Structures are given as C-alpha cells and as structure tokens.
Amino acid sequence: MFRPNRYRTHGCGEIRSTHVGETVTLSGWVHRKRNFGGLYFLVLRDHSGIVQVVIDTDAPFHAAAADIRLESVIQIEGEVVPREEGNVNPNMPTGEIEVKAKSFEIHSTAEILPFQIADDIDASETERLKHRFLDLRRDRLQHNMALRSKVISSIRRRMTEMDFFEFQTPILTSSSPEGARDFLVPSRLHPGKFYALPQAPQQFKQLLMVSGFPRYFQIAPCFRDEDARADRSPGEFYQLDMEMAYVDQEDIFAVLEELLVGLFREFTDWHVADAPFPRLTYRDTMLRYGSDKPDLRFGCEIQDISDLFATSEFRAFRSAIDEGGVVRVVPVPGAAGQSRKFFDGIDAFVKEQGGKGCAWIAFPEGADVKGSIAKFLDADLLAKLKDIPGAGEGSALLFVAGKAAEVATIAGRIRLKVADDLDLREKGVYKFCWIVDFPMFEWDEENECVTFSHNPFSMPQGGMEALETQDPLDILAFQYDIVCNGVELSSGAIRNHRPDVMYKAFEIAGHPASVVDEKFGGMIRAFKFGAPPHGGIAPGVDRIVMLIADEPNIREVILFPMNQKAEDLLMGAPSEVRPKQVEELHIRIEMPKED
C-alpha cells in the first residue's frame, strides 16, 4: 500500500499472524487505551486499520504511554507476538496478534476531543462539521471517502473504455437562466460585470459536439445557490457530465445502463437488475406513484377510481369529481390488521401536508369490512373496490380526493409514509427506471403564462411542426430522468440543435429571439454553422456514492460539506472580506434592513 520508510514498515491494519517474530515500525493515532494493573494496551490506528500495542510496566516510556491522550500521533517499534489463548479478538482483522513495544515516540499530542472517534458516538451536525478533520477519522467515513475515490476511478476507466474523451470546461462563465440561482463573481477588470460559476457545463458540452468531438465526459463541479436536502448538498456538487453526437435517447440509455450496472455490481453485493431498465412515462408515473422519482422496491401503486365514485351516493367524493377533481386510492396489502391509531396517523399526516384528510377502509380476513367511510358505501361498490389491483382479503385502502395535481402529490407521500411505517421496501436491491416523455412546457400559475417545464435546450417531440400546430401544454420533449430506489440520479435530454426550433420554443415560453441571442449567444451562433443531433445526461456522483454506501444523507459521502444554511463551519465561509477587496471589485455592500 505504501513504501516503507522511517515512520512505518507496515500499516496498522496489515499485521497478521504470519508476521509473528518480526520487528515492525508503526505510526498512527491512539484509538483506545486500557490499563491492566500498570500494563498498558494501546490500540493504534491508521488508514489501513487498527492493531493492539502492549506497553510493559518496566518500559522506560511507560509513563508517557500512560499519559498520552486519545488521538495523539505516536510511533512505536516492536515485535509481533501472538495473543494469549482466550484474548484473540475474531472481530478484528489483526485480532490474533499484538505488538510488544520496544520504543515509543510522540509526534504530536491531541487536546481534549470535542467528541469521541473510536466509539462513533453521535455528535451534533455543528460539532461534526466544525471539526470535520476529526469526523473524517471515523471508520465509516474513511470507508465512504475511499469508496468515493474508487467509484470515480471506475467511472473514468469505464467511460474511457467506451471511447469518451475527458475534457475540463470553464469554471468562470456567464450567467444564464437555467433554473437555480447562480453564484456570481464580480469582475475587477470589468466594473459592474459578473462571472457566474456554472450550474452545469450545459452549453460548453453542447459546443463540444458542434466542435466535432463525438463523445465527451467530465467529473464536473457544479454550483447552485439552492437549499440543502438529504440528497442534495448546498452550494456545490459533482456530476458525471456526458454528451454524445448522432444519438437518440435509446443510445444514451444503453451507455448509462452499461455504466451503472457495472459500477454498482463492482462496489456492492446488493442485487442489481440487468439492463434495459424499465421505461415509465412521466404521466403514468405521476398517476401510479405520485412522484417522478418512484421507488420501485415496493408496490402500493396509486390508482384512479374516480369512475367508481362518479355516480356514488357518497357525496364527499362525488362532489369532488363534479367539481373537476379526482378520487385516488393507495392499496396496502396486509394492512387490514393495523390499529385505528395507524389509520388516524395517516389522516393526520395528510392534513400536515396540506390535504383535507385521508379516508380508509380495510378488508380483514374472515371479517366484515371496516373503516372511516365503510358505512357510507354499498355492497356493490365495496365489492368493486375489493377487486382493484393490490386490494383483496387482508388489505386496506387509503383514499384522497380533490384536484388532480394536489391529489397526485398527497397520494405519493402517503405511499412513501406507508412504506416507512410498515417497512415495505425490499432489502438489498437497486431498482432503476427511466422516466420519459416529460412535458415540454407547463402553466405558471403565479405569472399566468406558459414556461419551460424541464430543460429549455431539449428537442420537442415532433420538432417545429409540434411547436407550430399543437397546444404547448400537450407537447412532449425528448427529456428523461434516471431514478434509483426513489432517488433521482440525473436528468438528461436530446438537445435542440436547430436555431429555428430553439427560437420558436423560447418564443412560446415568452422569450423573444433577442433574449436567446443575449443569454445563449455562443451556443446559438455555433448552431448556425452546422450542429449534429446530440444529447446527454449528467448523473450525480455524490448521489451514486450515497446509494452504493447505503447512506441516508449525502453529507456522509462528501469530504467537506456545508451545513443546511450553506455555511462551511470548518473554514468559516462565507466570510466578510477586507474593505480594499470590495473596493477593487467596484461593488458596494448594502446590508438588508432589519424588520
């Protein structure tokens, strides 16, 4: 693993019974220490693992070893000896041996720790991030960061083997309206003007296709001024950015599927399904799962049962339908035996999410139907409900009614909550799927206008003819997402490479040609000189590693993450700067007024 030198001949975790009788030199951190009648046992740790070191009572450095604090850095030289019978630790790779110290040197002493490293005791996020250098010494994070390095190396190897060129695109670029807020960098040489850190290398990678490079990739840093989430780091993240010329979306799917199947199988023993992954349309996904990030590890698929209640005597649902709404149900097999408290909890959850509540019925095996609305439904309707997919003996049905978009969201959240509460997700599997046929445009309620729904650089299905003849809200785009276990890894698209189609698409979204020329001038000019059909995708590296490591929070796979407020507590960023620095940039700081 390394070249032996004056500090060590072996890694702490490399010593085995085959080394018994050898003299070794080891360096590392004091992981644990124990005193048995004056005989000290130190557990020494480095990047390779841990090993037990014995300090005899008559050793000249006994007092120094006794006083040393945990996490101090020491160097020892000693003989590898077998542990006494009964003291072997089968839970340690080095548990059959120990090192009897002959010399002891302190390289640096540690202050009192803000939290323990060896015991993996939970510390507050603030303490962990403020002392991230200590947090990273923990075995779990050491494993995660090593995994991240190996995953990125594997990605590079696999992409190169598939004939992709690796290029680095600019970090300082121009601001463009791509959805999230830009991080802006004021220019010293050009007063009043700003660079922007790239939200993604979108325009540059398309320009590479126009420049004649058929396949490009990059482990690209991206910067977006947006709030943190469990699967999103605030400020910056890394993605596997790729673009291909002369392809349709199935060509891109094939490349990414080959990459992901190989990558996940290399680093985990969980089951990874063979390619091709399922293709689900956006419309169907929103109906069946209430989300465009469906978790396929469990069933409970949402179903529209508006037709069953359209002529029903149950007025609450019938009136919702008469007002243009829908009734949808989440079937939960095996849930009929749950307590009233369980169903009341779902109802309270829906109200917390902004819904009106959740009605329910259950079909206990060998017993009469029960539930909050059971007495309002006739026998014929109950029989039809019992026959819907996912229902039947022993099942429960959870109902929501209202406007279609609101109901879809609420039903999707109910489905996930039920999976959490009843532990329904299949274990040890990665279930991928593609979401396709996203709408090109959507209606902006706040501004009362048509706007882009996904990526403005996407090619509309049907091209110029669709833009000129169809209702904008009916036009689909060659846009797609790749999802794994309910986590969106990436969005992608076949690009709009024709200037006339791009001008028309932006016109429909309320942006005249002058805006396209101003905001995307470099790319639109390039397209006027011959642009091949092309498309791409950019799965998030952080999210890939998070899934492979089976971590619930993306912070656990990032070396130096920010907190939820986009603050770097270790380095103290963002920070104030000297007045001279502000003056050189020709800007003035005006603090917000206090309420």
Image (cartoon, rainbow, N blue to C red):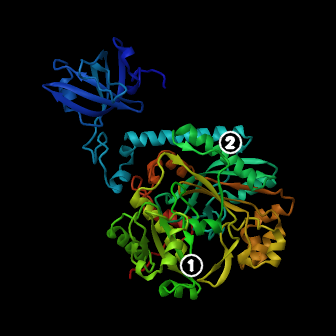
Q: Which residue is found at the position 81% from the left and 57% from the top?
A: 533
Q: Which residue is found at the position 73% from the left and 43% from the top?
A: 164
Q: From this viewpoint, is residue 403 visible?
A: yes
Location of residue 385 in the rendering, given as x and y in whole percent from the top left corner: 52, 72
Q: Amino acid at mark 1?
A: Leu
270 vs 90, left or right, is right
368 vs 406, left or right, is left
Regarding mark 2 in the picture, which secondary structure is present there? helix
Regarding mark 1 in the picture, which secondary structure is present there? helix
Location of residue 495 in the rendering, given as x and y in whole percent from the top left corner: 75, 61
Return the residue at label 1: 308
Return the residue at label 2: 159
- For the residues labelled 1 and 2, the Cα–Cα distance comes to 51 Å
The answer to whether residue 31 is above or below residue 571 is above
Location of residue 414 in the rendering, given as x and y in whole percent from the top left corner: 46, 68
Q: Which residue is found at the position 53% from the left and 52% from the top?
A: 543
Q: Amino acid at mark 2?
A: Met
Q: Which residue is found at the position 33% from the left and 66% from the top?
A: 339
418 vs 199, left or right, is left
Residue depth check, mark 1 versus mark 2: number of the one nearer the observer = 1
Residue farthest to the top, as pictured: 21
